[in-house]
Amino acid sequence: MKNFILLILSLNLLFSAYYSPGMTMIDNHQNQSHPVCFGEADEGDPDFLRFADYNGARNGGDYHVIFVDMAASW
């Protein structure tokens, strides 16, 4: 049982998140479109969210700071 728990913890470290706080998103990830389920996006197409629309280096100088908080109640 101890080995199983150690294996699970090791796999968790191998498949951890790509980004950590303070990192900048790469261009490929910024250009991906994500459908908006409720409400609408403030920039670009209101039905899809693209982080590149909020990047001032890509949208003509209108810079934004974004805090993404994702929560689920399963």
Image (cartoon, helix red, strand yellow):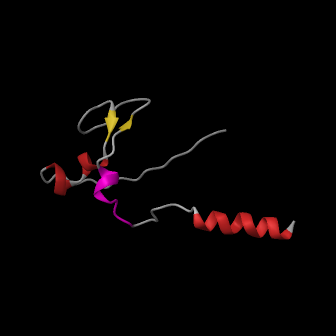
Image height of 6 relative to 41, above or below: below
Residue interval drawn in magenta: 23-30
Residue 28 covered by magenta stretch: yes
The extreme right residue here reads: 1
Classify residue 8 as left or right of residue 12.
right
Q: Quadrant of the C terminus?
A: top right
Look at 23% across and 37% down and name the residue there: 44
Q: Residue at x 46, y 65 (%)?
A: 20
Q: Nearer the viewer, residue 48 or 8?
A: 8
Q: Is residue 29 left or right of residue 68?
A: left
Residue 10 image offset from top left, x and y in percent: 67, 69
The quadrant of the rendering that contains the N terminus is bottom right
Q: Is residue 64 above or below residue 72?
A: below
Residue 18 highlighted magenta (yes or no): no
Residue 35 in percent (x, y) is at 39, 34
The structure residue drawn at horizontal position 76% and vertical position 70%, both measured from the top left corner, is: 6
Camera-side residue of 58 and 63: 58
Q: Residue furthest left?
A: 60
Asked whether, in this view, residue 72 is left or right of residue 70, the answer is: right
Residue 63 on image: x %, y %: 21, 54
Residue 44 vs residue 48: left or right?
left
